[in-house]
Image (tube, rainbow, N blue to C red):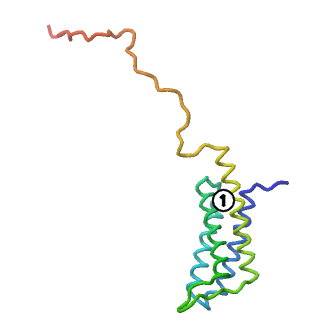
Amino acid sequence: MRIPRVRAAAILVLVAELGLLLSVLDEWPQWALRGIFYTVSAIAQGVLLASLLVGPGRKAIRRGAVLNVLFALLWLLSRTVGVPSILTLHRLPVGIVDTLTALAEVGVAVLLIAEWRTARVDQPAVDEPAVSEPAAVDEPAVDQPAVDEPAVDQRA
C-alpha cells in the first residue's frame, strides 16, 4: 500500500506539531519569548495539518513547504550560530525532541515540494483562464431588416 505524499506530509506535520508542543512545555518556564515562538509555530503547523487533510491547493502546499524550510533553517541557525541574547549570541542545546521535530519539518518540506512540482505540471494554475470556445458574434436575425426603416405612426 502506497501512502500519497500529501498524507505522508500530514503525518509528519502532526509529528512536528507534537514536538513543538512538547518544546513549549520545556521552553516556556525558561524563556517566555521562545515559548511564544514555539506556540505560534505549533499553531501554524496545526493550520497546515488541517489544510492538508481537507485537500490543499497549490498555494497551501507551497506555503507549507516554505514554512517548514524556514522552521528547519531556524533550528539549524539557533543550534550553530545561536539566538540573540542581551549581550551575546546564545547557542541552544541539541535535544532529541527538537532534532526529531526538525527532521520531521525537513521531511514535510521535501514531500510538499515534490507534490507542488508534480501538481504544477499536472494541473493548470487557478489564475490561468480555462480554454473556451470563442464568443458568438451578434448577427441580425433573419426577419429583421438590415437597414433601419422609419417608424410608422400607428395613431391614424
**In front of the other: 147 or 53:** 147
Which image quadrant for residue 78?
Answer: bottom right
Report the residue at 68% width, 57% height from top.
Answer: 113
Q: How many marks?
A: 1
**In front of the other: 124 or 136:** 124
Report the residue at 66% width, 49% height from top.
Answer: 119
Location of the N terminus by quadrant is: bottom right
Q: Position of residue 55 (x, y in %)?
A: 65, 54
In the depicted structure, whether residue 136 falls above or below residue 51: above
Q: Position of residue 128 (x, y in %)?
A: 54, 42
**In front of the other: 24 or 102:** 102
Which image quadrant for residue 7?
Answer: bottom right
Q: Position of residue 137 (x, y in %)?
A: 42, 21
Report the residue at 70% width, 86% height from top.
Answer: 93
The residue at which mark 1 appears reads as 52
Q: Position of residue 53 (x, y in %)?
A: 67, 59
In the depicted structure, whether residue 9 falls above or below residue 122: below
Report the residue at 74% width, 56% height from top.
Answer: 5
Q: Secondary structure at mark 1?
A: helix
Give the residue furthest to the left.
156
How packed is label 1: few (under 14 Cα within 10 Å), some, or many (20 or more)?
Answer: many
Give the residue furthest to the right.
1
Name which residue type carries label 1. Leu
